[in-house]
Image (cartoon, rainbow, N blue to C red):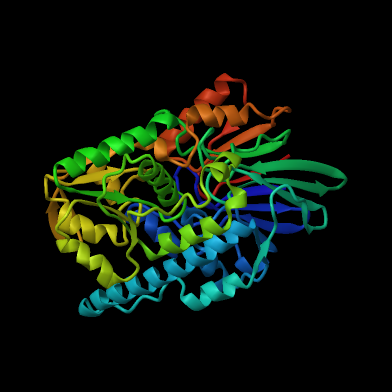
Amino acid sequence: MRLTFNGAARMVTGSCYLLEAAGKKILIDCGMFQGAKDINRLNYEPFGFRPKEISCLLLTHAHIDHSGLIPKLVKMGFRGRIIATPPTIDLAKIMLEDSAHVNEDDTMHENKRRLRMGLPPREPLFTIRDVQAASRLFRPVPYDSPCNIGDGLQMTFRNAGHILGSAIIELSATEAGKTRRLVFSGDLGQWDTPLLDNPALIGGADYVLIESTYGDRLHSAVKTRGDMLSEVVDETFRKGGKLLIPSFAVERTQELLYYLHGMARDRELPAESVFLDSPLAIDATRIFSRNMNYFSQGLRKEFTDPFGFRNLKYLRTAQESQTMNEYPKPCMIIAGNGMCTGGRIRYHLKYHLWKPENTLLFVGYQAEGSLGRVILEGADVVRMMGMEVAVKAEVRQIDSFSSHADSKELVRWACGFKERPKKMFIVHGEESSSLGLEKTLQGLGFETHVPVLGETVELK
């Protein structure tokens, strides 16, 4: 039995693990690399395996850094099942369609540049036709329902508490009469959040892959995030400014809408408009509303629909988005993407980042090399969209909005195993985060390893 780390090894993006067991090749996630240019280039490299030889793909959740290269996988010959929870399938389909449109548009602009330089054109990473072909391969499996994926191979999804439909994968593989148990954490959510139940604790495993996005850090208290958001809103509107919030379309946006709905219900939200400027986030919000049974019991009792309120306005078209350039009143604009590496938020930054009365609020993780990280680290001027833009707006951050468990919660999950795993592989984190979590787990007596990209290990 062998395990190869084809992504998210000493980096926080590109999750992709190849398991060779019981005569089959199983892929766990197939994510896109996101971040600095040298990381993005990895998307154009050949896979470290032959897609035609993969019997099935197990998808932990819909985020692009876990699902984004599925269309490329299909384009290169994969024809097996893609197994995921029902909400993950709904979300992945719209996210991959959006990604294909962005990819085709970016390639068109890149090829114009290459033509001027006398370079040959570049082929898109994948197209909408590849997404449509991938969509036909999805097969839904709900939580806690064992599923056979081959002779001697069985998997079960458990609730990861990260985003709607996110899953921990329990996998058992039997070879030569011996069964080994593997657990892939996927991305784990925080404990005691209002939207989702806590991550499931697993009884036992021989080998575990645990994420480490916040492996060396702690979040602020969850209970204060609503108060902090309210404070930033009030301060910005008192200055007569606009509050810009770069936000991921799935989970982060809906959590923001939940808190804003609560503020509106309690008459704590000023009467100014809240604009959701992301067709993908609008579609995702409707999927969230249709899947209320996947949310916590407390949320279902509190709201019939937590994600809609009177002040909220949707901006679906590019023309509607452009009206915000000259919008005369204070307002809040929630737009993708969450790290400011693309999407409509960049246009809002172009028009509003240099105005001191405005506020830029980060509510999510900013990967190394991303525009969001550069701004957050204190840049006075940033280069974007072919021009330099001064950073005069107030820059704030609420890190407790993260949908990832912090170091204390990761340890809590690791210590939830009734039987101590033989080894824990620490993945999906920048090197410092992974090594920080490794030090903590080793201090608790765990056998650990932080793999490097492309490494293969024998699971004996």
Q: In this view, does 142 lie to the left or right of 322?
A: right
Q: Residue furthest right?
A: 177
Looking at the image, is 1 positioned above or below residue 414? below
Specify the quadrant of the image occupied by residue 430: top left
Seen at 28% across and 77% down, the residue is 119
Which one is in front, 184 or 195? 195
Measured as percent of width and height from the top left, residue 320 is found at 27, 69
Q: In which quarter of the image is residue 350?
A: bottom left
Task: Please indicate whether residue 151 sits to the left or right of residue 400 in the image.
Answer: right
Q: How many labels does the image show?
A: 0
Q: In which quarter of the image is the C terminus?
A: top right
**Side of 232 relative to 416 (left or right):** left
Image coords of residue 444 (percent x, y):
59, 20
Residue 384 screen position, x and y as percent: 20, 58
Judge left or right: residue 84 versus residue 410. Answer: right
Q: Which of 19 and 260 is in front in this view?
A: 260
**213 in relation to 79, above or below:** above
Q: In the image, what residue occupies the spot 22% across and 41% down?
A: 395
Would residue 447 be seen by someone viewing this image from the given angle? Answer: no
User: Is there any visible trace of residue 129 in the rendered image?
Assistant: yes
Write the residue at 13% across / 45% down.
Answer: 357
Q: Where is residue 398 in the image (x, y as percent from the top left)?
A: 34, 37
